[in-house]
Amino acid sequence: MLRRWMPGRSNCYILPLLVAALAYLAGTYYIGLTDDLKAQNNQLIRQIAILEDKFLSEKEKFMSELQKDEFEITAYEPSCKSCGKWAKFGITKSGTSPNRLRTVAVDPSVIPIGSLVYIEGIGWRVAEDTGSRVKGKIIDVFVESVEEAREFGRQKKTVYYNKA
């Protein structure tokens, strides 16, 4: 005699096991992605440290090789108000996760994405992001909160960068 599958019988464990297996696989994939982003962030932080050391030892020679200009510096944070629909993804235009000690948004027609940027009074940053209001000689520095962004305000700063 053939037994039919009936919910609530001995087969009732299949669906929870399937859901658990899929959740495990999704979690493993997510952990792999976050590990990759952390590795990229660490690599960029190391590159910045190397450049800061070079900058301090060869400031005059190094700075003469870069473009120098006055920029308006503002701040942005990871909320929907600042980033719009892109906030839900938590990544920059270059594919990294933003970091307050590293990330700035630029107009890529002025400063190419991936460029190292030195902002006087702020330090070295990486041009990793863009923004709808970041046009021309405006740089948006990534901060952690709305309060930090408001406190930062708008500032005029001298900026050194490579022009592609």
Image: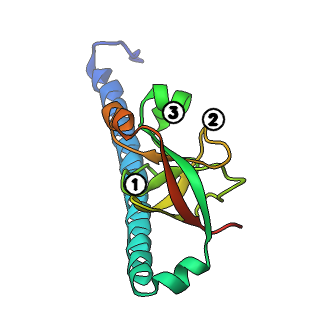
Q: Position of residue 139 (x, y in %)?
A: 55, 48
Along the polypeptide, which appears first: circle 2 or circle 1? 1
Along the polypeptide, which appears first: circle 3 or circle 1? 1
Q: Which label belongs to residue 132?
A: 2
The answer to whether the residue labelled 2 contacts the one labelled 3, judged by CB atoms less than 8 Å apart, is no
Q: Amino acid at mark 2?
A: Ser
Question: Marks 3/1: CA distance?
Answer: 25 Å
| Location of the N terminus (image quadrant) | top left
Look at discs 2 and 3 and give the one toward the viewer: 2
Q: Amino acid at mark 1?
A: Gly
Q: Residues within 10 Å of mark 3 (few under 14, many from 20)?
A: some
**Mark 2 residue element:** loop
Q: Which label belongs to residue 136?
A: none
Q: Is residue 67 above or below residue 154?
A: below
Q: Amino acid at mark 3?
A: Cys
**Mark 1 residue element:** helix
53 and 1: which is toward the camera:
53
Identify the residue shown where x is 27% and y is 21%: 10
Q: Is residue 27 left or right of residue 47?
A: left
13 and 48: which is toward the camera:
48
Q: Is residue 15 above or below residue 38?
A: above
Q: Is residue 157 left or right of residue 110?
A: left
Q: Is residue 138 left or right of residue 11?
A: right
The residue wearing badge 3 is 83
2 and 15: which is toward the camera:
15
Question: Marks 2/1: CA distance?
Answer: 31 Å
Q: Residues within 10 Å of mark 1 (few under 14, many from 20)?
A: few
Q: Quadrant of residue 61?
A: bottom right
**Mark 3 residue element:** helix
Q: Position of residue 7 (x, y in %)?
A: 34, 12
Identify the residue shown where x is 39% and y is 81%: 56
The residue wearing badge 1 is 32
